[in-house]
């Protein structure tokens, strides 16, 4: 049996925690208003190249697609490169660092000398809770909906992630060293699916 005093206290506690939930929800909704999209490699740095497909071209096309999808959802975006140029890693991170309330999403395609390896994985900087949560949301969309091996999220001391102050992730969107996955990655329909799923993960994180 619960006394009147306890009941009043319980109601008060519930009311306060309800308010806190509302406030933390609002705080979360405000935590970023711009996505910095980083197309991996570029210019003299071609990234991986397999079966005549260069990583730097795939990442730039995917970055532009992701930008379009996010803009359609009302999200502001900045690209670290818009053409086939070389940009230093610190300068890529710098684009995100000079604007408050941004998240950083770096796009890459993977390669391995064992050509049977395939799948999608998302990296975050070790110890970055926000980076891990963002990675979880993006990988959750990609891993659940795209038919390939879900390689999960992984902490990694990648320089571009280390240099970025806000939440940052690096998505490896597939192994172009695997002939089957390379064919998909080289197809515009597949890059559009990647863009939509990554955008979905970003919006869920928001
Ligand atoms: Zn790469």
Image: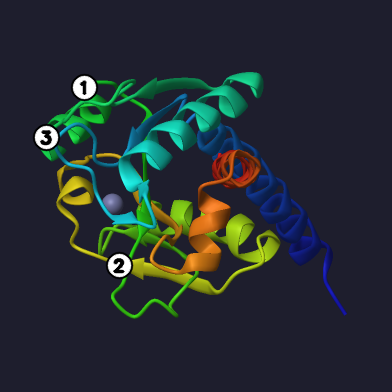
Quarter in which the N terminus is drawn:
bottom right
Q: Earlier in the sequence, mark 2 or mark 1?
A: 1
Q: Residue at x 36, y 69 (%)?
A: 154
Query: In the rendered image, which residue does mark 1 sit on?
Result: 98
Compared with residue 146, is residue 44 higher up or lower down, i.e. above or below? above
> Disc 2 marks which residue?
155
* Pointer 3 residue Cβ closer than 8 Å to ligand 1: no
Rendered residue at 65%/41% (across/down): 189
Q: Residue at (45%, 80%) from the top-left corner?
A: 116
Residue at 37% over, 27% down:
101
- Kindly check if marks 2 and 1 are in contact, taking CB atoms under 8 A apart as contact: no
Q: Secondary structure at mark 2?
A: strand
Residues 132 and 67: in front is 67
Picture disc at residue 88: 3
In contact (CB < 8 Å): disc 1 and disc 3: no
Tally of numbered discs? 3
Q: Quadrant of the C terminus?
A: top right
Circle 3 Cα neighbour tier, 10 Å, few/some/many (<14 / 14–19 / ≥20): few
The residue positioned farthest toward the front in the image shown: 52
Q: Position of residue 118 (x, y in %)?
A: 47, 72
Q: Secondary structure at mark 1?
A: loop
Residue 181 x %, y %: 52, 63
Task: Tell me the element at label 3.
Answer: loop
Q: Residue 59's image quarter?
A: top left
The first of marks 3 and 2 along the sequence is 3
């Amino acid at each position: 049996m619960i006394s009147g005093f306890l009941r009043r206290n319980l109601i008060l506690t519930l009311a306060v925690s309800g308010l806190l939930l509302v406030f933390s929800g609002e705080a979360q909704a405000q935590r970023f208003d711009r996505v910095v999209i980083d197309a991996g490699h570029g210019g003299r740095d071609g990234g991986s190249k397999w079966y005549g497909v260069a990583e730097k071209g795939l990442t730039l096309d995917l970055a532009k697609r992701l930008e379009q999808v996010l803009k359609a959802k009302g999200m502001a975006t900045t690209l670290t490169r818009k053409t086939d140029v070389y940009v230093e890693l610190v300068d890529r991170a710098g684009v995100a660092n000079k604007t408050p309330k941004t998240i950083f999403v770096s796009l890459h395609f993977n390669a391995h000398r064992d050509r049977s390896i395939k799948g999608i994985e998302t990296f975050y900087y070790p110890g970055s809770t926000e980076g891990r949560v963002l990675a979880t949301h993006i990988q959750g969309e990609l891993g659940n909906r795209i038919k390939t091996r879900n390689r999960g999220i992984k902490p990694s001391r990648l320089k571009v992630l280390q240099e970025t102050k806000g939440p940052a992730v690096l998505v490896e969107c597939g192994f172009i060293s695997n002939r089957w996955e390379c064919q998909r990655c080289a197809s515009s329909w597949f890059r559009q699916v990647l863009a939509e799923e990554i955008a979905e993960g970003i919006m869920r994180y928001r």
